[in-house]
Image: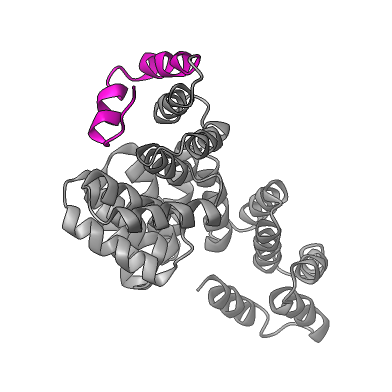
Amino acid sequence: MRRIWLLGAVVALTACERPAEVSDSERCLTAEEAEAKIEACTVAAQNQSLTPEQRSVAFSTRGDAFDVAGDVTAALRDYASAIELDAENPAALLGRGRILLASGQLDAAEPVLRRAIELHQSGEANQLVGEILVRRGEFSEAITLFNTALSHEPRSARALAGRARAKQRLGDLDGAASDYDQAVRADSNLAEARAGRCWLDLNEERELERARQDAEAAVSADPRNVEGQLCLGVLQLREGEWGNAKTSFEAALAVESGNPIALFGRGVARRRSGDNDGTDDMNLARDFDGHIGQQFDDLGVRTY
Protein backbone atom coordinates (compact mmCIF):
# COMPACT_ATOMS: atom_id res chain seq x y z
CA MET A 1 0.00 0.00 0.00
CA ARG A 2 2.79 2.42 0.97
CA ARG A 3 4.78 1.75 -2.19
CA ILE A 4 1.76 2.33 -4.43
CA TRP A 5 1.21 5.75 -2.81
CA LEU A 6 4.87 6.69 -3.17
CA LEU A 7 5.03 5.74 -6.81
CA GLY A 8 1.85 7.68 -7.52
CA ALA A 9 3.27 10.71 -5.77
CA VAL A 10 6.45 10.62 -7.79
CA VAL A 11 4.57 10.20 -11.06
CA ALA A 12 2.40 13.22 -10.26
CA LEU A 13 5.30 15.35 -9.10
CA THR A 14 7.66 14.48 -11.93
CA ALA A 15 5.30 14.66 -14.91
CA CYS A 16 6.97 17.78 -16.27
CA GLU A 17 10.54 17.15 -15.16
CA ARG A 18 13.68 16.80 -17.20
CA PRO A 19 14.45 13.13 -17.94
CA ALA A 20 17.50 12.95 -15.64
CA GLU A 21 15.45 14.09 -12.67
CA VAL A 22 12.74 11.56 -13.34
CA SER A 23 15.42 8.88 -13.57
CA ASP A 24 16.76 9.65 -10.09
CA SER A 25 13.32 9.41 -8.52
CA GLU A 26 12.37 6.28 -10.41
CA ARG A 27 15.61 4.49 -9.58
CA CYS A 28 15.01 5.22 -5.90
CA LEU A 29 11.53 3.68 -5.99
CA THR A 30 12.16 0.76 -8.29
CA ALA A 31 15.43 -0.61 -6.88
CA GLU A 32 14.77 -4.02 -5.34
CA GLU A 33 17.71 -4.91 -3.09
CA ALA A 34 18.14 -2.84 0.08
CA GLU A 35 21.72 -1.80 -0.74
CA ALA A 36 20.77 -0.73 -4.26
CA LYS A 37 17.71 1.14 -2.98
CA ILE A 38 19.76 2.98 -0.37
CA GLU A 39 22.32 4.00 -3.01
CA ALA A 40 19.69 5.15 -5.52
CA CYS A 41 17.64 7.05 -2.93
CA THR A 42 20.77 8.78 -1.63
CA VAL A 43 21.33 10.22 -5.10
CA ALA A 44 17.69 11.38 -5.30
CA ALA A 45 17.67 12.81 -1.77
CA GLN A 46 20.77 14.89 -2.51
CA ASN A 47 19.53 16.11 -5.88
CA GLN A 48 18.77 19.76 -5.15
CA SER A 49 17.00 20.19 -8.48
CA LEU A 50 14.17 17.94 -7.31
CA THR A 51 11.23 19.44 -5.44
CA PRO A 52 11.12 19.21 -1.63
CA GLU A 53 8.26 16.71 -1.92
CA GLN A 54 10.30 14.48 -4.24
CA ARG A 55 13.34 14.60 -1.98
CA SER A 56 11.07 13.84 0.98
CA VAL A 57 9.86 10.70 -0.82
CA ALA A 58 13.49 9.72 -1.47
CA PHE A 59 14.36 10.12 2.22
CA SER A 60 11.34 8.13 3.42
CA THR A 61 11.97 5.39 0.86
CA ARG A 62 15.59 5.16 1.97
CA GLY A 63 14.34 5.10 5.55
CA ASP A 64 12.17 2.09 4.72
CA ALA A 65 15.22 0.35 3.24
CA PHE A 66 17.31 1.09 6.34
CA ASP A 67 14.46 -0.20 8.53
CA VAL A 68 14.27 -3.46 6.57
CA ALA A 69 18.05 -3.78 6.87
CA GLY A 70 17.79 -3.39 10.66
CA ASP A 71 19.43 0.04 10.96
CA VAL A 72 16.65 1.81 12.85
CA THR A 73 18.86 4.77 13.81
CA ALA A 74 19.50 5.60 10.15
CA ALA A 75 15.84 4.96 9.36
CA LEU A 76 14.68 7.41 12.05
CA ARG A 77 17.12 10.02 10.77
CA ASP A 78 15.78 9.66 7.23
CA TYR A 79 12.15 9.81 8.33
CA ALA A 80 12.93 13.02 10.24
CA SER A 81 14.57 14.51 7.13
CA ALA A 82 11.57 13.50 5.03
CA ILE A 83 9.13 15.14 7.45
CA GLU A 84 11.25 18.31 7.57
CA LEU A 85 10.95 18.58 3.79
CA ASP A 86 7.28 17.58 3.66
CA ALA A 87 5.32 17.45 6.93
CA GLU A 88 2.52 15.63 5.12
CA ASN A 89 4.55 12.64 3.90
CA PRO A 90 2.45 9.77 5.33
CA ALA A 91 5.09 7.12 4.62
CA ALA A 92 7.63 9.02 6.73
CA LEU A 93 5.13 9.52 9.54
CA LEU A 94 4.15 5.86 9.46
CA GLY A 95 7.74 4.65 9.44
CA ARG A 96 8.75 6.93 12.30
CA GLY A 97 5.71 5.95 14.34
CA ARG A 98 6.35 2.25 13.77
CA ILE A 99 9.91 2.47 15.10
CA LEU A 100 8.93 4.62 18.08
CA LEU A 101 6.22 2.13 19.02
CA ALA A 102 8.60 -0.82 18.69
CA SER A 103 10.98 0.92 21.12
CA GLY A 104 8.18 1.46 23.65
CA GLN A 105 7.85 5.23 23.15
CA LEU A 106 4.05 5.25 23.11
CA ASP A 107 3.59 8.96 23.83
CA ALA A 108 5.92 9.92 20.99
CA ALA A 109 4.50 7.38 18.55
CA GLU A 110 0.77 8.09 18.94
CA PRO A 111 0.55 11.68 17.57
CA VAL A 112 2.79 10.77 14.64
CA LEU A 113 0.62 7.78 13.73
CA ARG A 114 -2.64 9.65 14.22
CA ARG A 115 -1.37 12.31 11.83
CA ALA A 116 -0.60 9.54 9.34
CA ILE A 117 -4.20 8.35 9.67
CA GLU A 118 -5.52 11.86 9.02
CA LEU A 119 -3.43 12.22 5.88
CA HIS A 120 -3.68 8.70 4.50
CA GLN A 121 -6.18 6.23 5.95
CA SER A 122 -3.84 3.23 5.91
CA GLY A 123 -4.64 -0.04 7.58
CA GLU A 124 -1.20 -0.22 9.20
CA ALA A 125 -1.47 3.19 10.88
CA ASN A 126 -4.82 2.24 12.43
CA GLN A 127 -3.41 -1.11 13.53
CA LEU A 128 -0.39 0.52 15.18
CA VAL A 129 -2.50 3.03 17.11
CA GLY A 130 -4.70 0.10 18.15
CA GLU A 131 -1.62 -1.61 19.59
CA ILE A 132 -0.81 1.53 21.58
CA LEU A 133 -4.32 1.61 23.03
CA VAL A 134 -4.15 -2.07 24.00
CA ARG A 135 -0.97 -1.37 25.97
CA ARG A 136 -2.77 1.47 27.71
CA GLY A 137 -5.79 -0.66 28.56
CA GLU A 138 -8.17 1.23 26.25
CA PHE A 139 -9.55 -1.97 24.77
CA SER A 140 -12.86 -0.83 23.28
CA GLU A 141 -11.31 2.04 21.33
CA ALA A 142 -8.51 -0.29 20.27
CA ILE A 143 -11.05 -2.70 18.77
CA THR A 144 -12.55 0.17 16.76
CA LEU A 145 -9.14 0.96 15.28
CA PHE A 146 -8.40 -2.69 14.54
CA ASN A 147 -11.78 -2.93 12.79
CA THR A 148 -10.81 0.04 10.63
CA ALA A 149 -7.44 -1.53 9.87
CA LEU A 150 -9.16 -4.77 8.86
CA SER A 151 -11.55 -2.90 6.59
CA HIS A 152 -8.43 -1.87 4.63
CA GLU A 153 -6.56 -5.16 4.95
CA PRO A 154 -8.96 -7.98 5.92
CA ARG A 155 -6.17 -10.55 6.31
CA SER A 156 -3.84 -8.41 8.42
CA ALA A 157 -2.50 -10.92 10.94
CA ARG A 158 -1.23 -8.18 13.26
CA ALA A 159 -4.60 -6.41 13.33
CA LEU A 160 -6.41 -9.71 13.97
CA ALA A 161 -4.00 -10.61 16.77
CA GLY A 162 -4.32 -7.14 18.29
CA ARG A 163 -8.11 -7.30 18.18
CA ALA A 164 -7.99 -10.77 19.72
CA ARG A 165 -5.95 -9.50 22.64
CA ALA A 166 -8.33 -6.60 23.22
CA LYS A 167 -11.35 -8.93 23.09
CA GLN A 168 -9.65 -11.33 25.50
CA ARG A 169 -9.07 -8.53 28.01
CA LEU A 170 -12.73 -7.52 27.72
CA GLY A 171 -13.87 -11.11 28.40
CA ASP A 172 -14.97 -11.96 24.85
CA LEU A 173 -13.09 -15.26 24.81
CA ASP A 174 -14.93 -16.77 21.84
CA GLY A 175 -14.28 -13.65 19.78
CA ALA A 176 -10.64 -13.66 20.83
CA ALA A 177 -10.24 -17.33 19.92
CA SER A 178 -11.74 -16.73 16.48
CA ASP A 179 -9.43 -13.77 15.82
CA TYR A 180 -6.34 -15.65 16.99
CA ASP A 181 -7.24 -18.57 14.72
CA GLN A 182 -7.62 -16.23 11.74
CA ALA A 183 -4.35 -14.47 12.58
CA VAL A 184 -2.44 -17.75 12.72
CA ARG A 185 -3.96 -18.85 9.41
CA ALA A 186 -2.93 -15.53 7.85
CA ASP A 187 0.62 -15.71 9.24
CA SER A 188 1.67 -18.85 11.08
CA ASN A 189 4.98 -17.21 12.06
CA LEU A 190 3.47 -14.19 13.83
CA ALA A 191 4.78 -14.56 17.38
CA GLU A 192 2.12 -12.27 18.87
CA ALA A 193 -0.70 -14.41 17.50
CA ARG A 194 0.87 -17.70 18.54
CA ALA A 195 1.73 -16.47 22.04
CA GLY A 196 -1.69 -14.89 22.52
CA ARG A 197 -3.50 -18.07 21.56
CA CYS A 198 -1.19 -20.07 23.83
CA TRP A 199 -2.19 -17.97 26.83
CA LEU A 200 -5.86 -18.13 25.91
CA ASP A 201 -5.76 -21.95 25.74
CA LEU A 202 -3.66 -22.19 28.90
CA ASN A 203 -5.91 -19.94 30.98
CA GLU A 204 -9.01 -21.75 29.78
CA GLU A 205 -7.43 -25.22 30.15
CA ARG A 206 -8.24 -26.16 26.57
CA GLU A 207 -6.17 -27.55 23.72
CA LEU A 208 -2.99 -27.64 25.78
CA GLU A 209 -1.14 -29.64 23.15
CA ARG A 210 -1.85 -26.85 20.66
CA ALA A 211 -0.82 -24.32 23.30
CA ARG A 212 2.59 -25.98 23.54
CA GLN A 213 2.94 -25.94 19.76
CA ASP A 214 1.97 -22.27 19.65
CA ALA A 215 4.48 -21.35 22.37
CA GLU A 216 7.29 -23.17 20.60
CA ALA A 217 6.35 -21.55 17.28
CA ALA A 218 6.24 -18.09 18.91
CA VAL A 219 9.73 -18.30 20.43
CA SER A 220 11.11 -19.89 17.28
CA ALA A 221 9.79 -16.97 15.22
CA ASP A 222 10.94 -14.38 17.77
CA PRO A 223 13.11 -15.51 20.71
CA ARG A 224 12.59 -12.09 22.34
CA ASN A 225 8.81 -12.49 22.46
CA VAL A 226 8.26 -12.40 26.20
CA GLU A 227 4.68 -13.71 26.18
CA GLY A 228 5.74 -16.73 24.13
CA GLN A 229 8.65 -17.55 26.44
CA LEU A 230 6.44 -17.18 29.52
CA CYS A 231 3.68 -19.40 28.15
CA LEU A 232 6.24 -22.02 27.13
CA GLY A 233 7.91 -21.85 30.54
CA VAL A 234 4.64 -22.39 32.40
CA LEU A 235 3.75 -25.36 30.20
CA GLN A 236 7.21 -26.81 30.79
CA LEU A 237 6.75 -26.44 34.55
CA ARG A 238 3.46 -28.31 34.32
CA GLU A 239 5.31 -31.15 32.59
CA GLY A 240 8.18 -31.20 35.10
CA GLU A 241 10.76 -29.96 32.57
CA TRP A 242 12.71 -27.92 35.12
CA GLY A 243 15.80 -27.21 33.01
CA ASN A 244 13.82 -26.23 29.92
CA ALA A 245 11.50 -24.03 31.98
CA LYS A 246 14.46 -22.25 33.57
CA THR A 247 15.88 -21.55 30.10
CA SER A 248 12.54 -20.15 28.88
CA PHE A 249 12.10 -17.85 31.88
CA GLU A 250 15.69 -16.63 31.60
CA ALA A 251 15.05 -15.75 27.95
CA ALA A 252 12.08 -13.64 29.10
CA LEU A 253 14.15 -12.02 31.85
CA ALA A 254 16.82 -11.06 29.31
CA VAL A 255 14.18 -8.81 27.75
CA GLU A 256 12.23 -7.79 30.89
CA SER A 257 14.47 -8.17 33.92
CA GLY A 258 11.71 -7.48 36.44
CA ASN A 259 8.95 -9.64 34.96
CA PRO A 260 7.31 -11.30 38.00
CA ILE A 261 6.04 -14.35 36.07
CA ALA A 262 9.52 -15.03 34.71
CA LEU A 263 11.15 -14.51 38.12
CA PHE A 264 8.66 -16.71 39.99
CA GLY A 265 8.72 -19.36 37.27
CA ARG A 266 12.52 -19.50 37.27
CA GLY A 267 12.44 -19.77 41.04
CA VAL A 268 10.04 -22.71 40.87
CA ALA A 269 12.18 -24.42 38.23
CA ARG A 270 15.30 -23.95 40.36
CA ARG A 271 13.67 -25.21 43.56
CA ARG A 272 12.04 -28.21 41.91
CA SER A 273 15.41 -29.18 40.39
CA GLY A 274 17.11 -29.05 43.80
CA ASP A 275 18.44 -25.49 43.89
CA ASN A 276 16.96 -24.04 47.08
CA ASP A 277 18.24 -20.58 46.17
CA GLY A 278 15.33 -20.49 43.74
CA THR A 279 13.38 -19.14 46.70
CA ASP A 280 15.21 -15.84 46.22
CA ASP A 281 13.67 -15.51 42.75
CA MET A 282 10.22 -16.33 44.09
CA ASN A 283 10.48 -13.78 46.91
CA LEU A 284 11.69 -11.11 44.50
CA ALA A 285 8.71 -11.84 42.26
CA ARG A 286 6.37 -11.39 45.23
CA ASP A 287 7.89 -7.93 45.76
CA PHE A 288 6.66 -7.04 42.26
CA ASP A 289 3.31 -8.86 42.53
CA GLY A 290 1.94 -10.08 45.84
CA HIS A 291 -0.54 -12.39 44.08
CA ILE A 292 1.97 -14.14 41.83
CA GLY A 293 1.87 -17.41 43.78
CA GLN A 294 -1.90 -17.68 43.39
CA GLN A 295 -1.54 -16.97 39.68
CA PHE A 296 0.77 -19.96 39.28
CA ASP A 297 -1.63 -22.12 41.28
CA ASP A 298 -4.42 -21.05 38.91
CA LEU A 299 -2.19 -21.99 35.96
CA GLY A 300 -1.92 -25.53 37.28
CA VAL A 301 1.72 -25.28 38.40
CA ARG A 302 2.81 -27.10 41.52
CA THR A 303 5.25 -24.66 43.07
CA TYR A 304 6.56 -26.84 45.96
Report if residue 4 is visible in the image.
yes
Coordinates of residue 79 in the picture (x, y in percent): 64, 54
Residue 33 sits in which quadrant? bottom right
Coordinates of residue 252 in the picture (x, y in percent): 51, 36
Q: Nearer the viewer, residue 218 or 268?
A: 268
Residue at point 34%, 59% (across, down): 210
In the image, taking residue 128 as reference, residue 82 lies left or right, namely right
**Measured along the vertical axis of the image, is residue 276 above or below residue 114?**
above
Q: Nearer the viewer, residue 292 or 134?
A: 292
Magenta stretch? Answer: 277-304
In the image, taking residue 95 as reference, residue 188 lies left or right, namely left
Residue at point 33%, 20% (across, down): 289
Residue 234 sits in which quadrant? top left
The quadrant of the image that shows the C terminus is top left
Q: Nearer the viewer, residue 276 or 10?
A: 276
**Measured along the vertical axis of the image, is residue 229 above or below residue 284?**
below
